[in-house]
Image: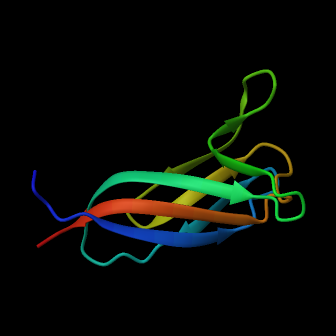
Amino acid sequence: DGSTLYEKTVDCGALPNNTAKSTPFNISNLGRIIDYRVNTINTSTGATKVLPFFNSSYQCICFAEISATAVTIYASGDRTAYNSTYTTIRYTKTS
């Protein structure tokens, strides 16, 4: 629609252990969230994943959702070995 797009990357730290974890992203005058992606890395092994990710039975074991104020990451089981997680948000602003 011709709106200017903005992008912000938020450090979400380690993935949670069998729970949900919310990280606020503090965007003023947020219009619409156009897209977001969550990348995580196990810095000990170098293994990198993009959320959501699934186990060998194709069950979702880690995913993220975004609200107007925060990104929330949900994990089934202990995923804390993935200790460096970033969410990049593409959005518009209100006038």
Task: Identify the residue shown where x is 78% and y is 42%.
Answer: 76
72 sits left or right of 14 in the view: left
Q: Position of residue 1 (x, y in %)?
A: 10, 50
Q: How is the image coloured?
A: rainbow
Q: Residue furthest front?
A: 46
Query: How far across and how far down the image is residue 11, in percent?
Result: 60, 72
Q: How many marks?
A: 0
Q: From the top left corner, tell me how far across and down residue 55 is, in percent.
A: 79, 31
Residue at 30% x, 61% y is 91
Residue 87 is left or right of residue 61, and the answer is left
Say which residue appears at 30% left-offset and 78% top-offset: 28
Q: Residue furthest top?
A: 57
In the displayed structure, would residue 31 be above or below residue 47? Answer: below
User: Which residue reaches farthest right?
Assistant: 44
Q: Horizontal placement of 65 versus 95: left or right?
A: right
Tell me the quarter of the image containing the C terminus: bottom left
Q: Closer to the camera, 35 or 26? A: 35
The image quadrant that residue 73 belongs to is bottom right
Front position in the image: 50 or 19: 50
Q: Is residue 79 above or below residue 63?
A: below
Residue 38 vs residue 1: left or right?
right
Residue at 82% over, 65% down: 43
The answer to which image quadrant residue 82 occupies is bottom right
